[in-house]
Image (cartoon, helix red, strand yellow):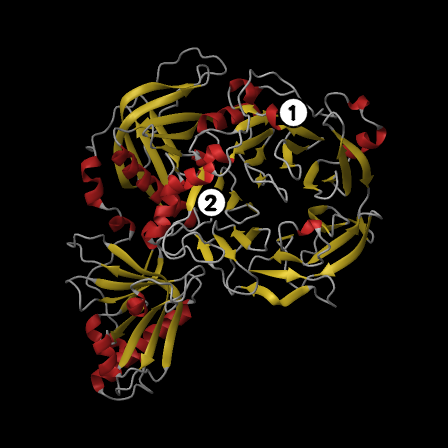
Amino acid sequence: MNILKRFLGSTPKSQLSMIPSGQFYLKRSPGSPKSANECLFTDAVASIRETSTPYNYILVVQKAYEEGEEPSKEDDGDDDDSTYGLADERIFLIDSAINIHVYNKSSGTVVSWLNKEGDEGESFEFVVDESVKNADVEQFMRTIRSCCFERKYRRSSVGVTDNQLEEFIYDPDKQFSDVASTEADDDEFDEWAFQDAKESITTPTKSKTNANASKKPVPLEPALGTEIATASAELRLYDPVSETFKLVASDCKIKVIDLGSWNYWLSVVTTDISVQTSITPAVNPIFNYEQLSFIFNADNQGRLVSWLLRFESPRLLLLFQTAYMKASYEGLNQIRWEKAEDSERKYNLDAFKIEDDDSETEKYLAEDESDESEEEEEYVPKSKIKTAKKHDPESEDEETQQFYHQSKNKNLTISYTNDRTYVTNGNNIGVFKSTEDDDMKLTTAIKNLSLGSKEFVPDQMMLHEQDSSLIMKGGLQNDTLYRMDLTKGKVVDEWKVKEDVPVVAFGPSKKFNQLTLEKTFLGISEKGLFKIDPRLNGNKLVESESKTYATKNDFSSFGTTANGFIAVASNKGDIRLYDKLGIRAKSLIPAIGDAIKNLDVSADGKWLLATCATYLILIDLTLHKGTNAGSLAFNKSFGKDNIPKTKILRIRPEHVAHMKEITGESLNFTGAYFNTGTDAKEQTIVSSSGPYAITWSLKKVLRGEEGSYLIKRYGSNVVGDNFKFGTDKNVVVALEDDVGIAQKREFKKANKNSLSLFD
């Protein structure tokens, strides 16, 4: 590349055309022993430039810095800094001999050309981002043909017609096959494959079963498509009566199948039965390397059934997991697995493993030797929450009965400065306090909220200025917030954030600002994050402390630390970490694929907790390697060598199946939170799904104790729960029709009793 620069001139005169966004690949020849495709830049810009040599032009592909990546020339102590710049730029002399052309495939429009310096059959591919207009690609290719014309005929192409340029349109001798047919690493799966003989599938003999026993699935023919991988394993079926997985077949045949259009299928077949399921989050997958097992759910005539596959070795389980995660990742992100960087693929694989943790986790666990006293007792139904509508409505005073009969409870927020909890119910807000017997009592109801003549129903709220104000959002004005003075019980201010900037979420700029008189706070839109200052005239968005993106990142939630670091999540599943407002993110944590509904961050910034519909993600934000070891990812990028240490918190598939059988509802977590307090260490997590409130011990999660969660079931759905400020012993729970406190000791291990019984 340096020789080419010197020959053509080191400084290009001008840029003639550009494709602003895409991915850059080296596509190797079919006979290469290496993988078929190597992603060189996951985010790149392709440009055509004039050179100092007349009638010669170059195609330049440059790496575009993603958020979370350090600048190429930043001195971070790495040995290879002197050559890093060369790795970020590739230069090609534009000539008809490189056969540059454009074609379409499943992943989008591709500009391709030969690698003249590589092995025979090698080529480069620039996969154009879907945001780029077709007209821009057409203009780019016309410029390419004009450059080829000038190089061949040594004269200007100005005035040359399209017909004259047709000789430089390269038409490949054969059609390029779809990328899916070449993506699987055949060598890796050769010894794992099984023969393609048709299995004899028969209907299982019908037998009498009680209501709690699993029915064997009705056989289904395996789906037709491209096989990504095949395997053999032992198959077991969960029996809810004995609460164990019972052997079904010592040898089953497994296929991961690409059905096309980003749909993927898992097929498990024995001589007697066939288990077929689409690969989606509803499968609730768990990979356990200690037991060499994969547990998942599959629908059987409207009922979820839990299965266990046991493999002969860690290697076989890893091969299966790689194939499964490839399918899951592509289905959720609609991006090919091979396009992801190695670090992103490893991040996805490691997140779903359950195995012994490392010395770093042990070090953290040793920092606090306090016992959490979670020894299990025999389950005895006991409750501090009375379900007002169903149990004893006469025991409640008239105002409480009226409040609960207005509508269903929705939002929950807890005071940091006094013993008060606020719950919305339609266009009413209930204010609760705890009683001496650890119950919750309605102290007052702020009724009939309205804006002018229209009813106002809050969908978000935040306590502010030492809990003297309640900031709310709701109704049709998504770019407007409202402040209630809690001493008056009235909405006293209406704040336009900025015209046509819908506020997706808002919250304190520092985790404990609620305890102060700080006026400003943060907000996010789908495309940016910003500070809000109610003291400004007109719009309240602080332009100098905002970050707006050109493309829609689909931001969904954010959280802050005690010193003001910011984590922002999206419905795409990725997370950005900022040390301050107004600049690019220091770190970008890649998406597993599911939308993130809620974020919480520990006060010190070490732990991040993300809520997805069917699982939670716990991420260690400390860098453990390199010159920046010990730093937080808010300050320094993870880079390629520091893959975030991640734990997926799941409900075991067999428990999910039992919960759905009882309630008829699929798993859908509400926002998950750490316990918090100015002097409290985060050690417990709480969330809920349907009528179940659920807690996790942070220590047990970090030790890799699968299924370490505790559960408490109620008579109606939990709409929100969170810890009382300063402790993890008491959880405030808002049901659809009641509000109360649950003691930590009331949560029990999940089993058929605790999942079925409520008080």
Q: Residues within 10 Å of mark 1 (few under 14, many from 20)?
A: some
Residue 131 visible: yes
The Cα atoms of the two marked residues, 1 and 2, are separated by: 33 Å
Q: Earlier in the sequence, mark 1 or mark 2?
A: 2
Q: Nearer the viewer, residue 335 or 583?
A: 583
Q: Is residue 369 above or below residue 348?
A: above
Marker disc for residue 619: 2
Q: Residue at x 26, y 86 (%)?
A: 53
Say what secondary structure mark 1 lies in: loop
Callout 1 amino acid: Gly
Residue 355 percent across, percent down from the top left: 37, 34
Indicate the quadrant containing the C terminus: top left, top right, bottom left or bottom right.
top right
Q: Quadrant of residue 162?
A: bottom left
Residue 142 in the image, given as x and y percentages of width and height: 33, 76
Outermost top residue = 208
Amino acid type shown at disc 2 = Ile
Quadrant assignment, res 676: top right
Left or right of residue 65: residue 567: right
Residue where numbered disc 1 is placed: 715
Q: Position of residue 412 (x, y in %)?
A: 68, 40
Give the foreground label among 1 and 2.
2
Secondary structure found at label 2: strand
Decide if residue 261 is in sight here. no
Relative vertical location of residue 217 with respect to residue 27 in this rendering, above or below? above
Residue 444 appears at what percent x and percent y? Answer: 82, 37
